[in-house]
Image (spheres, grey):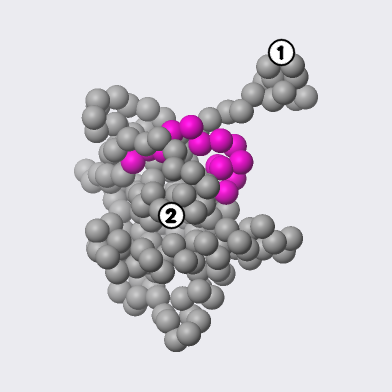
């Protein structure tokens, strides 16, 4: 066992748990449940000095650092290492996982959490503000179907990345992702 891994007295590795700040499709418990096979405990939170953008041609948002802005979302507590791996795979190459400080809305307590920041800070397809309520009304049902396909694909030996799953889902049967 490596020096950085910890073990309990019986030699079984101790499971490390993570906090993850979510701000887009993962605000929907139904999406989280499809991905993680459970809905972890959570608390509403604010990420300061970031902005949540819409992305042209995508139904999910991106965040990037922007002074004097804030993103409301929630922190998922008790995320295991295997679950964090699933989230990393789901977020794919479009995002990079970073550790940020968030403020819990019910207590103003500050804590460290992982979040997924858009990889291309100069992306010309980012615009405006992404709206969760509109997403729930217009896109959530299809997104849950796409996420279910992603999870089924993950269980295959040669799984596709999430972006490929997203693009193939929204291009089948004449469906297209929104252009705005």
Specify whether residue 64 is in view: no
Callouts 1 and 2 close, C-beta under 8 Å: no
Who is closer to the viewer here, 128 or 40?
40
Q: Residue at x 32, y 26 (%)?
A: 110
**Residue 90 shows up from this direction:** yes
**Residue 163 in the image: x percent, y percent?**
53, 66
For disc 2, the marked residue is: 31
Quadrant (top left, top right, bottom left, bottom right) of the C terminus: bottom left
Residue occupying the point 43% across, 54% down? 31
Q: Residue at x 61, y 61 (%)?
A: 152
Q: Position of residue 107 (x, y in %)?
A: 24, 25
Other residues around mark 1 within 10 Å, as few (<14) / some (14–19) / many (≥20): few
110 vs 142: above or below: above
For the image, the number of numbered tags is 2
Which dot marks residue 140?
Answer: none
**Residue labelled with disc 1:** 9
| Residue span colored magenta | 74-86
Label 2: which secondary element:
helix
The quadrant holding residue 47 is top left
């Amino acid at each position: 066992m490596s020096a950085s891994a910890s073990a309990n007295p019986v030699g079984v590795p101790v499971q490390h748990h993570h906090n993850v700040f979510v701000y887009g499709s993962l605000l929907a418990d139904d999406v989280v449940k499809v991905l993680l096979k459970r809905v972890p405990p959570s608390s509403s939170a604010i990420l300061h000095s970031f902005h949540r953008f819409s992305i042209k041609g995508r139904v999910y948002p991106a965040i990037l650092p922007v002074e004097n802005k804030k993103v409301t979302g929630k922190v998922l507590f008790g995320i295991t290492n295997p679950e964090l791996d699933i989230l990393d795979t789901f977020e794919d190459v479009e995002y990079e996982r970073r550790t940020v400080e968030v403020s819990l809305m019910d207590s103003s307590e500050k804590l460290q959490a992982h979040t997924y920041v858009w990889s291309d800070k100069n992306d010309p397809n980012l615009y405006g503000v992404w709206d969760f309520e509109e997403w729930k009304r217009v896109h959530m049902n299809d997104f849950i179907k796409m996420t279910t396909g992603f999870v089924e694909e993950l269980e295959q030996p040669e799984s596709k990345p999430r972006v490929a799953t997203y693009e193939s889902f929204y291009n089948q049967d004449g469906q297209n992702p929104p252009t705005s």
